[in-house]
């Protein structure tokens, strides 16, 4: 029996409550994971898990074994790195969940990460809602806004930046926008994610304020909202990662730059610092560095507005100028993110 492999299987089964989730993570069959845990039970002479039709739960002996199992696995990993630091390489699959705009952005830059680490692979789950990391078999997730789950480890890696946009075909013949309150007289395409999605927040010199917008078209995916706006269906708030090319080409127009959409903090969350594999740490650092490289996603970057050098846009159909200069620094290609 490979004791460390069996301990790793036992720890993941304890975290997920499922043999099948662990099997999917590892790319093996469910019986293979079950055999590893059964071998560990035979090794220690105790039943560690209780199998049922609703899942897998730890016995008292299994719960008592958890701290020692974690310590032993961490010691083994530390020993491997200390004994042969040049051989320490991130290996295996990292499964992560993230919003569509950021997923597209990462895809544009993933080649460098994968070329640098040939034994590493990424499994991206693209969704705009939060996940249950354990039940969904995720190693980490990128989330927007405050983190309410105290059981998760969170690392702040930047801020969102977004534009209020519409297609020229929608704007033609419609009244000009002079303030966010004018949105009440327009068609708005809503990105539904958090419940009160038809309440849009904006920044002003006096602070943040909200506007309730009318909506006859909504979607729970940023890419769908993007396509709807390109099709002339109304006005939306979309990530700078998603609309930079459209603004430069004129397919979309930036509206009310003096009232930019409110920014949200971006966090990477994961279940535990303990026993965090090297492959997961490498991906976390890759994402953090990628966001740091984008001036528009830094925590303290003024974005956008006249105070930051953006010229007034009148009815919103002028050039977006300086605001897009910082977008280009992050590269083109990929709702707020």
Image (tube, grey):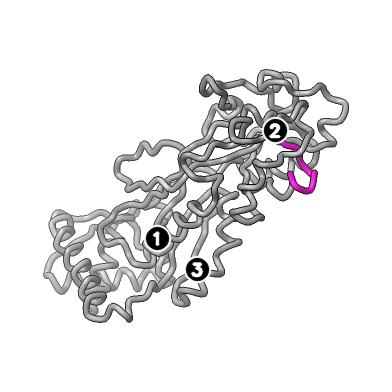
| Quadrant in which the N terminus is drawn | bottom left
Q: Which mark is residue 306?
A: none
Residue name at image x 65 percent, y 47 percent: 325
- Would you say the residues marked 1 and 3 are in contact, meaning their CB atoms lie under 8 Å apart? no
Residues in magenta? Answer: 247-254
Tell me if residue 77 is in the magenta stretch.
no
Closer to the eye: label 1 or 3: 3
For marks 1 and 3, the one nearer the N-term is 1
Q: Which mark is residue 311?
A: 2
Q: Vertical placement of 69 versus 265: above or below?
A: below
- Local secondary structure at mark 2: loop
- Would you say the residues marked 2 and 1 are in contact, meaning their CB atoms lie under 8 Å apart? no
Residue nearest the viewer, comparing 215 with 317: 317
Q: Say few, some or many: other residues with alpha carbon within 10 Å of mark 2 (under 14 / 14 to 19 / 20 or more).
A: some
In the visual, does 64 lie left or right of 8?
left
Residue name at image x 53 percent, y 69 percent: 112
Q: Vertical placement of 215 versus 266: above or below?
A: above
Q: Where does label 3 land, which residue? A: 113
- Local secondary structure at mark 3: helix
Q: Where does label 1 land, which residue? A: 21
Residue 39 shows in this picture? no
Residue 121 shows in this picture? yes
For marks 2 and 1, the one nearer the N-term is 1
């Amino acid at each position: 029996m490979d004791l460390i492999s069996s301990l790793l299987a036992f720890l993941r089964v304890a975290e997920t409550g499922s043999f099948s989730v662990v099997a999917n993570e590892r790319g093996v069959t469910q019986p293979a994971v079950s055999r590893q845990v059964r071998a560990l039970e035979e090794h220690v002479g105790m039943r560690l898990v209780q199998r049922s039709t609703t899942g897998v739960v730890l016995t008292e002996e299994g719960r008592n074994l958890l701290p020692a199992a974690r310590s032993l696995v961490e010691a083994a990993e530390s020993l491997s790195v200390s004994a042969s630091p040049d051989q320490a390489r991130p290996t295996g699959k990292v499964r992560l969940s993230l919003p569509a705009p950021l997923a597209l952005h990462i895809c544009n830059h993933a080649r460098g990460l994968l070329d640098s680490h040939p034994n590493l692979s990424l499994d991206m789950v693209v969704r705009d809602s939060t996940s249950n990391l354990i039940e969904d078999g995720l190693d980490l997730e990128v989330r927007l806004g405050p983190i309410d789950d105290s059981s998760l480890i969170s690392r702040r890696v930047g801020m969102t930046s977004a534009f209020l946009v519409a297609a020229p075909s929608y704007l033609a013949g419609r009244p000009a926008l002079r303030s966010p309150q004018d949105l009440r007289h327009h068609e708005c395409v809503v990105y539904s994610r958090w419940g009160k999605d038809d309440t849009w927040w904006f920044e002003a010199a006096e602070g943040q304020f909200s506007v309730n917008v009318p909506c006859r078209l909504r979607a729970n995916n940023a890419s769908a909202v993007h396509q709807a706006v390109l099709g002339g269906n109304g006005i939306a708030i979309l990530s700078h990662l998603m609309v930079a090319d459209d603004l430069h080409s004129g397919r979309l127009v930036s509206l009310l730059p003096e009232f930019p959409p409110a920014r949200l903090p971006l966090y990477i969350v994961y279940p535990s610092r303990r026993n965090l594999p090297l492959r997961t740490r490498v991906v976390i650092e890759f994402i953090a560095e990628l966001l740091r490289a984008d001036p528009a996603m830094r925590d303290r970057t003024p974005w956008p507005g006249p105070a930051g050098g953006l010229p007034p846009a009148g009815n919103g159909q002028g050039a977006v100028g300086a605001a897009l200069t910082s977008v280009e620094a992050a590269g083109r290609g990929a709702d707020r993110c």
